[in-house]
Amino acid sequence: MSDQTTALVIEDEPQIVRAVARALGESFDRVLDARTAAEGIDQAAAARPDLIVLDLGLPDRDGLAVCREIRGWSSVPIIVLSARHSDHDKVALLDAGADDYLTKPFSAAELQARVRVQLRRARASLPGEGELIEVDGLTIDLAGRSVVRGDQSIHLTPTEWALLRALLRHAGKTLTHNQLFQEVWPNSTGDPQQYLRAYVAMLRRKVERDPMRPSLIFTEPGVGYRIAAL
């Protein structure tokens, strides 16, 4: 079995393909490209890449549908390139299974940084229930339901625990308001943003060094929340 790392770029504009391929060259042994949605899906299935960079504006099919299809059978990290800037579009991308998004125009350095985050997430084993998690000066024991900073124990309510667990399960990834709401309150109705605004504020007051300047739980305005990568 080959140990080569592979990236797949699904993009129909040749100059963007070349720019993205150059940027990815520092992290991958080979970079494949596809110019249509159909070709991209075929290559994703055949090559099983370690990461996909996907453009939304493909000639034969919307990239959002491509993302949903690939996500149906693969957990490969997907970074979407889009000329669409609205919060609604960003939420739709994440709900479709994208791991991250970049709006055009973007710099090679920004793409490389996003790629490094996704590779760290993909290569890191998810913490088991019996493992201790060390992040931002906190020691979190999911099995024992304990959070400690230094020698100070931090008490969390059941809902705060559910919210923290949901964020940690996807550490480093932005979760939309709807995604988090469904994980924490799966059978509830209401406004996800209102619920989360209140509970994230309470959780931050307990786990952040400075709740007014979060270094652990970050807000993605109009989209959702993200916890620091482990």
Image: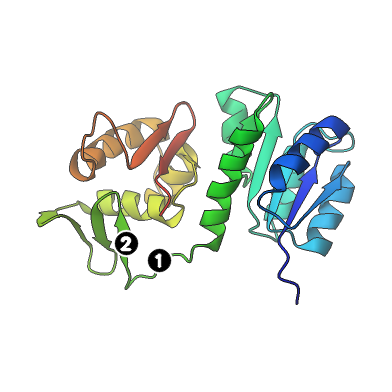
Q: Which residue is mark 1?
A: 127
Q: Please tell me which residue lies in front, 30 or 101.
A: 30
Quarter of the image for the C terminus: give it: bottom left
Q: Which residue is mark 2?
A: 133
Q: Position of residue 201 (x, y in %)?
A: 26, 35
Q: Which mark is residue 189?
A: none
Q: Can the viewer see residue 191?
A: no
The residue at 86%/46% (across/down) is 34
Q: Please tell me which residue lies in front, 188 or 81.
A: 81
Q: CA distance from mark 1 to mark 2?
A: 7 Å
Q: Position of residue 168 (x, y in %)?
A: 39, 54
In this rendering, is residue 148 above or below 125? above
Report the label total.
2
Instruction: Specify the farthest residue to the front.
Output: 26
The residue at 43%/45% (across/down) is 180
The residue at 67%/49% (across/down) is 26
Residue type highlighted by circle 1: Pro
Q: Can the viewer see residue 46?
A: yes
The answer to whether the residues at label 1 and label 2 have Cβ atoms under 8 Å apart is yes
Look at the numbered disc 2 and give the secondary structure of its residue: strand
Of mark 1 and mark 2, the one earlier in the sequence is: 1
Residue 138 appears in which quarter of the rendering?
Answer: bottom left
Q: Position of residue 119 (x, y in %)?
A: 58, 54
Residue type highlighted by circle 2: Ile
Identify the colour scheme used. Answer: rainbow
